Each structure stands twice: as structure tokens, then as C-alpha cells.
Amino acid sequence: MKKTEILSHIDHTLLRATSTWNEIKEICDDALSYHTASVCIPPSYVKRVHLAYPELNVCTVIGFPLGYNPTEVKAAEVKKVIEDGASEVDMVVNLGDVKNGDFDAVTEEIRTLKQASGDKILKVIVETCYLTEDEKVQLCRCVTDGGADYIKTSTGFGTAGAKIEDIRLFKNHIGPNVKIKAAGGVKTVADLELFLSEGCERIGTSSAVKILADM
């Protein structure tokens, strides 16, 4: 797989709480140079990045990384970051609702946030490391029925990241209009190629540009 093809699927990511403006600028410069799909950055930097890099596709995170904010708060966050210039929003599901088996509430929250995001891309982070297989299957249905654009494996802040077995499970249970994003622990060229070959449309990683630079 060519380097340029891999990079076109990368959400070049920096979500550390201590991320500085100079570090954010660095990944934005890299994203422009290497033509990544987007940069994925903290919400507080969205407006500044959009003004400094108007040509850049900006992705950010909502309810991150724990997901237990009330739906109304998440919806307000979505509207604010889109107003600030985000084109893509990665939300975290309420794992309490998941563990309580209240999948109707999960679906309704996704639907509400999709309405708030309008024509912008909404990705739903399900945090697979905390889920049973049945919960993963149920969440595929929630994401599909809620009208989201992507299901995403992980925040990168949980106990584990993306696993290829989960990508295969997602493919069998999501609707035809839902794409897959892998995130967390995708750190080698072999990993990138494997996840893309298994059907991921996006990969969220902080290391892709570095590991592909000499490819």
C-alpha cells in the first residue's frame, strides 16, 4: 500500500490534556504536508486552528474521554465546535447507559448529536476495551439507527485500543451507511495496512506521519 494512500485515511491526532499551541501547530503543518484526512485536536483549539489553517479538515472530540456528560451538554459542545470550524466530531457514548442495557438511550443520544452536527461527520466512540461482545453488537445497531457516519473503536485513553477482531465484528453488524474508524495502539506500518485492508476508512493515530516519513 502506498504511503500517500495510507495517509489519506489518517486522522492525525493530538489529544493530550497538556498539548501546547506549538505542538498543535506542528501536527497541523504535518497534516498539510502529508495530506492526512484530518487533524483531530482538543475542542479548545478548534477555532484557533480553523483561523490559522482554513484549508485544513478539523476533527475534534465531544464528551471525551469518559462519555458520561448529559446529552444536552454534548449537543451544546457539538454546536459550539462546528461554529468554531470543526468539520468532524468524534463523540463518546455514555458507557453507563451501555452497562445498564439502555441501548434506546444510547441510540437517542447519537440521533440527537447527529441532528446537532447536521451535514458534518459524526463518529461514535464505543470504547471497545470495556465492552462484551453482545454490547459491541448492540452498539453497532445504536450507531446505525442513530444515523451516525462512523463507529470508532476507542478513545486511546482506555485500557486497550483497536483490535482487528472488533473491526471484523463491526463489519458484520453495522448498517451499509456506517464506516469504521480504528484508534488506539495503531503504531506500525503493518498495523496501518492491516486495519485499512480489513475495511477501516479512518485510523486515528499520533504516530502515522512519523512512521511513514521514511517509507
Image: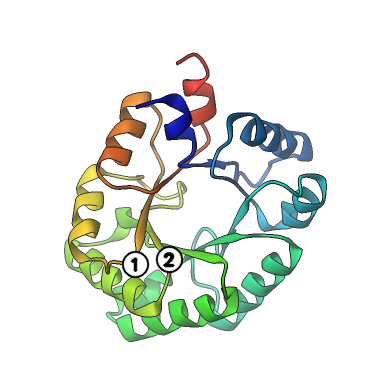
Q: Quadrant of the C terminus?
A: top left
Residue at coordinates 35% horizontally, 71% vertically from top-left?
143
Residue at coordinates 53% horizontally, 27% vertically from top-left?
209
Residue 88, how many percent across, how many down? 57, 59
Q: Amino acid at mark 1?
A: Asn
Q: Quadrant of the N terminus?
A: top left
Q: How busy is the neighbourhood of tag 2: few (under 14 within 10 Å), some, or many (20 plus)? A: some
Pick the residue in front: 36 or 152.
36
Q: Which residue matches tag 1? A: 177
Q: Secondary structure at mark 2?
A: loop
Pick the residue in front: 10 or 70.
10
Q: Which residue matches tag 2? A: 149
88 relative to 159 in the view: left or right:
right
Q: Amino acid at mark 2?
A: Asp
Residue 96, how many percent across, how many down? 38, 74
Q: Earlier in the sequence, mark 2 or mark 1?
A: 2
Q: Is residue 135 above or below residue 158?
A: below
36 relative to 128 in the view: left or right:
right
Residue at coordinates 21% horizontally, 62% vertically from top-left?
132
Residue 151, how many percent across, how many down? 37, 61
Residue 165, how many percent across, how many down? 20, 47
**Alpha carbon separation for disc pair 2 and 1:** 7 Å
Pick the residue in front: 92 or 152.
152
Q: Are marks 2 and 1 in contact (CB under 8 Å)?
A: yes
Q: Residue furthest top?
A: 214
6 relative to 142 in the view: left or right:
right
